[in-house]
Image (cartoon, rainbow, N blue to C red):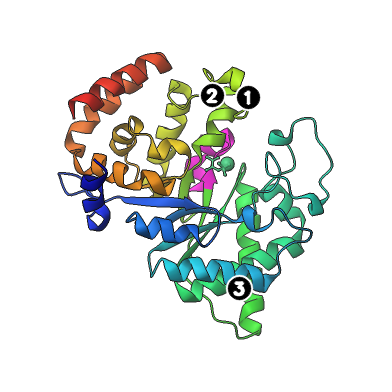
Amino acid sequence: EAEALKKLITAESMTIDGIAVEISGNIANPKDAVHVMENGGDGVGLFRSEFLFMDRETAPTENEQFEAYKRAAEILKGKPLIVRTLDAGGDKHVPYLNIASEMNPFLGYRAIRICLDRDDLFQTQLRAILRASHYGFVKIMFPMIATYDELRSAKEAVQKAKETLKKLNQPYDEAIQVGIMVEVPSAAAIADILATEADFMSIGTNDLTQYVMAADRMNELLGNLNNTFHPAVLRMIYQTIKACKNAGKMVGMCGEAAGDKLLIPLLLGMGLEEFSMSPTKILKSREIIRRLDTRALGTLVDTVMALKTADEIKAYLETFSRRL
Ligand code: PEP
Ligand code: MG
C-alpha cells in the first residue's frame, strides 16, 4: 500500500466530482515543512509557533522568529503557511513568561489571552510573521479566540505591527490573511459573528472536544468522553463550517480529527475545505478524498447527524468507509 500511496505525492486533492480541497500538514518547526513537501502536502495548515518558545531561557527575538517563519515559507515554495501565534499555557510550559500556577491551566491564562496582555511579546511575533510574508504565502492565525472583542483587538495588533514595519521600510504582504482557530465552544457558538472579521477559520478539534465535553484531553480515564464522534462536538463543527460558508470564508480543520479516515467523508460532506494533519497522514487522506463523490455525501451527513451516540456514529462511519 505504501507504494501505491507514493504515487499520490503529486496527485491533486480532488474528489471524483471535481471538488478540490487542501490536504496540509501540521508542523512544530521549519524542518517539518520538508516532511510536508515530501508527503505531497498542499501547504501547512498549522505551524505551532510555541515550539520556538519552549525549552529555552528567553523568548526568541524578532529576527530568530523571522528566520524560522521565512525558512518554512521558502520550503513550501508558494504553498500556504498558516502560522499560529503563540499558544503558551495549558499543557505548553514557557517558564520565562512567569505565568502564575493555576488550578485549571486549560481554562486559564493561555494563548491569545496572554498575547493581548503582553504587547511586546505579541508585537515582536507579529512583526516576524509579517516580514516572513514577503517570502511566501503566509497567513496569521490566532489560537483560543473566545469572543468578538478578542478578535478585534488581535487584528488591531496586526495593524499596529504593519504600521511599525511600514515606518521601517520593511517589506511584508499588505493583503495577508488573518484567521482564527475555533477551539473554544463560545467561538463555535458565534462563528457567524466571528466570520464577519476573520478571513478564515480552522477548527481545532483537540481543544474543542475537551471543552465541549468538559473532559481533559490529557486524562486517560476520560477517553470515552474526549471523543470527537460525540454528536455535541459534531454539531459544533457543522455549525462552524456552515457559518463560514455562508460568509464566504475559507474553513479548515487542524485538530487530529482532520486526519481521521472515518471522519474525512463526513467533514467533506459538511463542506470542510482544508484538512491539516500530521504529515504522515497526508497521502492516506488524499487517497480517501479521491475516492469520494460529494454529491453522495449530503445523505451521509443527514444520517450521521440524526444519530444519538458517538458509538453509533463511529459504527456507521466504519460501515461507510468499508464500502468505499
Ligand atoms: C487543537 O486544539 O485542535 C489544535 C490543533 O491545537 P493544539 O493541539 O496545538 O492545542
Ligand atoms: Mg488547541
Tag 1: residue type?
A: Asn
Mark 2 highlights which residue? 226
User: Which is nearer the eye, 324 or 252?
Assistant: 324
Q: Quadrant of residue 123?
A: bottom right
Which residue: 47% across, 42% down? 192
**SS class, disc 1:** loop
Instruction: Mark 1 or mark 3: name the one nearer the start of the chain.
Output: 3
**SS class, disc 3:** helix
Labelled disc at residue 162: 3
- The residues colored magenta run 181-197
Tag 3: residue type?
A: Lys
Q: Would residue 101 be seen by someone viewing this image from the given angle?
A: yes
Say whether mark 1 is within 8 Å of ligand 1. no
> Can you tell me which quadrant of the image ligand 2 is in?
top right
User: Where's the C terminus, which quadrant?
Assistant: top left
Mark 1 highlights which residue? 219
Which residue: 61% across, 86% down? 169
Question: What is the crowding at mark 3: few (fewer than 14 residues within 10 Å), some, or many (at least 20)?
Answer: many
User: Which is nearer the eye, 172 or 30?
Assistant: 30
Question: Of tags 1 and 2, which is closer to the observer?
Answer: 1
Instruction: Mark 2 or mark 3: name the one nearer the start of the chain.
Output: 3
User: Which is nearer the eye, 121 or 4?
Assistant: 4
Measuring from the top left, give residue 108's x and y in whole percent.
74, 37
Q: Is residue 136 above or below residue 187?
A: below
User: Where's the N terminus, which quadrant?
Assistant: top left
**Callouts 1 and 3 close, C-beta under 8 Å:** no
Instruction: Mark 1 or mark 2: name the one nearer the start of the chain.
Output: 1
**Callouts 1 and 2 close, C-beta under 8 Å:** yes
Measuring from the top left, give residue 152's x and y in whole percent.
61, 55
Q: Is residue 77 above or below residue 115?
A: below
Question: Of tags 1 and 3, which is closer to the observer?
Answer: 1
